[in-house]
Amino acid sequence: MAEKGIYTKREDGRAFTDVRPMTAKVGIVPSADGSASFSTGKTKAIAVVRGPRTLHPQHMQNAKTGILRVSYGMMPFSCGDRIRPGPNRRSEEIGKVTEWALSSVVDLSGFPNTVVDVFVQIPQADAGTRVAGINAAALALAHAGIPMKEMVSAIGVGKIDKTLVVDLDKYEDSEFHDAEGSTDIPIVLTSRTKEIALLQLDGKISVDEFRAVIELGKVACDDILKVQMEALKNVGVNDE
Amino acid sequence: MVKEKRQIVIPGESIISGNEFLPGDGAYRDGNDVVANRYGIANIFEKHVRVVPVSGAYYPKRGNTIIGTIVDITFNGWLIDFGGAQNAFLPVAEVPRYVNKNEMAEFLNFGESVIVKVWDVKSRGVDVSMKMRGYGKIDGGMILAVGSNQVPRIIGREGSMVKMIKNATGCDVTVGQNGKVWISGKDVDMEIAAKKIVEFIGCNVLVAGLTEKVEKMIGEMSLESGAHAGVPSDEGKVEIVSENIDEVSEE
C-alpha cells in the first residue's frame, strides 16, 4: 500500500489478504434436490435447492427457459440482535443480486416453464453473508445436478482507513470506528473464465485502489474455489 | 486412442483436452478442452465424454420405469406427475386396451397411480407408455417415496436386493427410477416389513456391505430369507432390472 493508514494489524491476526478459515459441505438436507453449507469464520450460510419443477403462477413461466429464483434470509438471532423474520428490503435485494450472479452460469434452457428455487439462510452472521450465501448456493446448485457452465466463488474485499482488506468480519465492517466508514466490495468470480458475475460497492474508493481490490478478490476466489471443489469431490457418493 | 477414465468433476472443470473428444451429456466444448457443465462422474468411453449425475433431482431417461399419479385428463391422454420437472404424457394409444375417449376417467381417473415406461424425453415433456408387460395401473399396496439416487442401491446389482426383499416378505416390489417404490403383498404386515427394509436401504445408501446388513435385518425381523419360498413371488409380473441406472459402476 502506498500510504500507511492507522489500521496496521487485524484483530484476529490474519494477514490483510487472508480469508477466514473456511468450511464447506454438500448434502446437508436429504429431502432437498441439492444442499450445501459454507462458512468463513463465524459467518455461516446454508443453501437448499429445489427443482427444476413446474412454475406457478403460470404467467411467470418462460417457454424458452427455466428460471432461477433465489430467496435470502437472516435468521432472527443470527447477528446478536433479533431480526424480524420474513422478507425485508435488504434480504430482497441480496436475494436478487444472488440470483443475477448465479444466472450468469446456470443454464436452464433444457427445462422450459420450470423454476429452480434456491433458499439461502444465514444462521450466524459475522459480515460477508451475501458472499457466503453465494458460495453455498453455487455448491447447492452443483449438488442438485443443475447444468452450469462453471462454478462461482464470492469474496468481500474492503478498505479500512487506507488499507485494503480481504474478507472483512463484522468488527472491521461496522464496528471499527477509529477510521472513516469502511468500504465493502463483494465480488463474484466465475471459476473457468474468471469473469466477474457480481460487483457491488458500498463506500468510496479510488480507481487505482479499486483495481487492486479486484486483483485481491481474484486471488481470494481461487482459494474459495479450492474449498468448494473439495466439498463436492469428497462427498461419499458411489463408494461401491 | 482409446481412453477410459472415471473421476468426479465439478461444473467448469476440464475433463480432458483434445479435439478428438466429443462432448456428450453434461459436457461442452471450450476451445481445445471438453468441460463439465454438471456435477457428477465423468465417463470417457473411447472418444465420447459425458458426465453422469450422482445427486440431485430425477431426470427421466428413455427406457426408465417410473411410478406416478394421474393429475390431468386431456382429450387424447393423461398427464402423470412423477416428481420430475414436467409432467409425463400418456397417450390413449399407449394403453393396453381400447379406451372410449368420452369416458377416459373410467380407465384412469385423477389421483390414480400407474407404472409406466419412459418412451421419449424432450425438453417440453416426457412421453410414456404402459403397453408392455409389467406396466399398468396400481391397485392396492403402498407407494413409498425414496430419493431417485437411492434407487440403484434398492435394486442392487442385477436386481439382487429387490429379489431379497421379495423372497423375504413375499411381497411384490416394483422400483421406479424416479424414486417411488410400490409394495404389494397378501397381508399388510408383510408390506410394512418390506417398507421398513426399503427405508433402511434408503437411509444407508453409502454404507459398505449393505447386503449383509439387510440380510441381518431380515433375520432380526424373523422373516427369514426364503421362508416364503413356497409361495412363488409372481416372477413374470414385474421385473425391473437395473439396466440404465448402473451404467456408471458397470462399464
Image: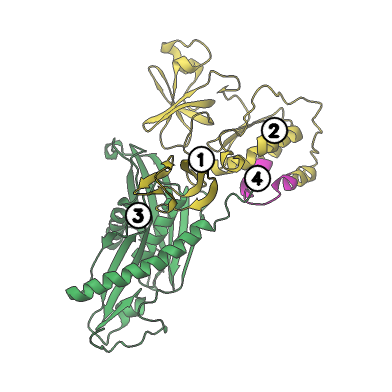
Chain colours: A green, B yellow
Q: Name the subunit of mark 2.
A: B
Residue kind at label 2, given as amino acid type:
Val
- Marks 2/4 in contact by CB < 8 Å: the verdict is no
Local secondary structure at mark 2 = helix
**Which label sits in the foreground, 1 or 3?**
1
**Which label sits in the foreground, 3 or 2?**
3
Q: What residue appears at the point 22 percent right and 76 percent down from the top-left corner?
A: A209
Local secondary structure at mark 1 = loop
Q: Which residues are magenta?
A: B196-214
Q: Name the subunit of mark 4.
A: B
Measured as percent of width and height from the top left, residue A153 is found at 37, 62
Q: Earlier in the sequence, mark 1 or mark 2?
A: 1
On screen, residue B191 versus residue B57, left or right, reads right
Residue kind at label 4, given as amino acid type:
Ile
Local secondary structure at mark 3 = strand
Q: Which residue is mark 1?
A: B46
Q: Are discs 4 and 3 located on one and the same chain?
A: no
* C-alpha gap between disc 4 and disc 3: 33 Å
Residue kind at label 3, given as amino acid type:
Ser
Q: Earlier in the sequence, mark 2 or mark 4?
A: 2
Residue kind at label 1, given as amino acid type:
Glu
Q: Name the subunit of mark 1.
A: B
Q: Which residue is mark 3?
A: A71
* C-alpha gap between disc 3 and disc 2: 43 Å
